Image (cartoon, grey):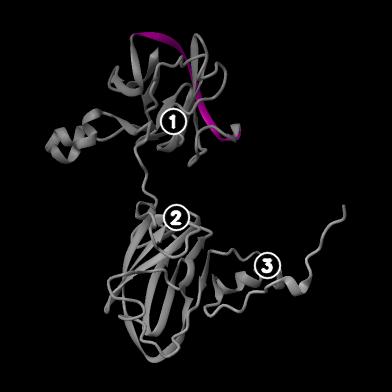
Amino acid sequence: MGLQMTQAQELKFPDSDKSPMDAATYPRNAAWRNYLSGDDKNTPMKIRVHYSRPNMMGRVIFGDLVPFGKEWRLGANEATEVYFGVPVEIGGTMINPGYYTMFADVYPTQWVLKISSERHIAGGQNRDISMDVASVSLPVVHTAESREAFTIGFQEVDDNHCNMIMGWDRSEVSMPISFAPAFMAGDDASPMDLAQYPRNSRMRNFLEGAEKEAAMPKVRVVYSRPKKKGRNIFGELLKFGEPWRMGANETTEITFFENVKFGDKDIKAGRYGIMVVPNQDKWEFVVHTGIPSWGTFGHDPKNNIASVTVPVEKTGKEIESLSIFFQKKSDNLVHMIVAWDQTMAQVPITMK
């Protein structure tokens, strides 16, 4: 049986829409970057808006066609869609890259613009407001000339900011957009801490006289404190013979406030990284200059300046969070004690 073809005269072709769809892109030349050359050819598309553009056609727009106090789809037909190609901040809210829809509650002196993660809807009828991700109030500016078609465009402010401009008739609003949003860290599973020797050097501003003078800091360690969480740590989570950052997250840092001897090496006062190579019966502690860094990945042994190997000991009890502290042995000798799970090691540091 042959394929039956529809005759052209049987097809009904759609008329032109009275509110044709349009797009606005930022930066503008990202829309035609295939015509560009050099580095411009790689211009990233940071924002793109698809919207339908109704015309005034002699009508009263705001307060009549678009009632005050009611939500408007920012155009006609389908809900206006915005794509963010990079993280942005709008109205103090950070928005991740992706596709969203936009709406506005319109008032005579302001629009309350809302951005939603709900998509593929025709306007805002029965939309799910729980999917709104940001909201911002924008003052209305009344322009000298009337704009026949609703229009969305962009105004560059600087490398990290632009304004999205929306206008129709004699009303216009401007929405500031930042491409450098502030990222606020959540709770860390391995919170950062510090240990300092002598211990009261952390609070010298509370001391006076000779006591204050004697509390000059000598050594400090800044590290993140991972938890055991029921895991087998040494020999399993931390493989024997493999370098460990002596903590979590960023490379653990050790600061010597005066010249010291570490193992058989003299180290000048300064800030360094420190890591451990754990083994079943001994640990090797290595001081290096490879900071700032994130752990031991890609560590260059050429940055190592001193090391010392010490025996491991049993703690006598289970230590849930990695713990580092200092213990004075004599006027010029302090031990840095590193303990986790049921294992510990003591590192001698001699003040010069």
Q: Nearer the viewer, residue 86 or 236?
A: 86
Q: Amino acid at mark 2?
A: Glu
Q: Nearer the viewer, residue 101 or 181?
A: 101
Label 2 neighbourhood size at 10 Å, few (<14), some (14-19), many (20+)?
some
Q: Is residue 38 magenta?
A: no
Indicate the position of residue 184 as horizontal and vertical percent values: 36, 48
Label 3 neighbourhood size at 10 Å, few (<14), some (14-19), many (20+)?
some
Q: Which residues are magenta?
A: 302-316
Q: Which residue is mark 3?
A: 41
Determine the secondary structure under disc 3: helix
Indicate the position of residue 144 as horizontal and vertical percent values: 37, 92
Determine the secondary structure under disc 1: loop
Q: Nearer the viewer, residue 45 or 343?
A: 45
Q: Which residue is mark 1?
A: 248
Question: In percent of the image, x 59 and y 31: which residue is there?
Answer: 301
Evaluate whether residue 19 shows in this view. yes
Name the disc covering residue 118, or none: 2
